[in-house]
Image (tube, grey):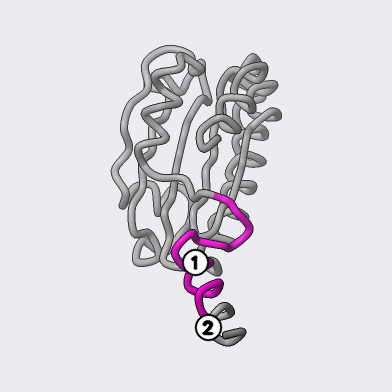
Amino acid sequence: MRRMTLCLLCALALLTGCGGGETPYGAEDAQVLLDEGLFEGDMAPVEQRLVAVIYGIDEDAIRECACYMAANTASSADEVTILVLTDEKAAQAAEEACRKRVENQIRDVASYAPGAVPRLEAAVIRRSGSTVLLAVGDPEALPEAVDALHK
């Protein structure tokens, strides 16, 4: 009986995704954040192959992605990117790539769009399982909106 109970508990854990209780982000979450009005101006979609180049990520490691960047990059560094990767190792590398991207953006935009720097400094980068989210937008509302995605 004890063995059967243990097997049932293991099966339940697998079915419910018992891996820390976190729900991974999906590409549809980018649209949810866009709909919240957290970003300045028009946001333009970016193709997966370009996302891989911009972030320095192996495109084969990306299963799915959604990326929108400010259409007018001369005045805004806003973006939202969600990467669904092949595994957690790829997600760790992508998370680091997101951090480097933000650091580089801060350095680059400081000279021509200094108003974008505080938004970049408040960038939200989250990893859940094999997914990574990067969002640069309204520094007051964005963290709460990201936290609310899977409550």
Residue closer to the observer: 29 or 15: 15
Residue closer to the observer: 144 or 121: 144
Residue closer to the observer: 39 or 107: 39
Examine the residues drawn in magenta and state their main secondary structure.
helix
Q: Over which residues does the magenta segment extend?
A: 7-22
Tag in front: 2 or 1 = 2
* Residue bearing the label numbered 1: 12
Instruction: Kindly indicate whether the residue at mark 1 contacts the one at mark 2 (C-beta within 8 angstroms).
Output: no
Location of the N terminus by quadrant is bottom right
Specify few, some or many for label 2: CA neighbours under 10 Å numbering under 14, 14-19, or 20 or more: few
Three-letter code, disc 1: Leu
Residue closer to the observer: 94 or 108: 94
Q: Is residue 8 magenta?
A: yes
In terms of secondary structure, where does tag 2 sit?
helix
Residue at image position (55%, 35%) is 151
Q: Is residue 80 magenta?
A: no
User: x and y percent of residue 103 in the render?
Assistant: 67, 41
Numbered badge on residue 4: 2
3 is higher (above) or lower (below) than 31? below
For this view, does 92 lie left or right of residue 15? Answer: right
Separation of disc 2 and disc 1 at Cα? 12 Å
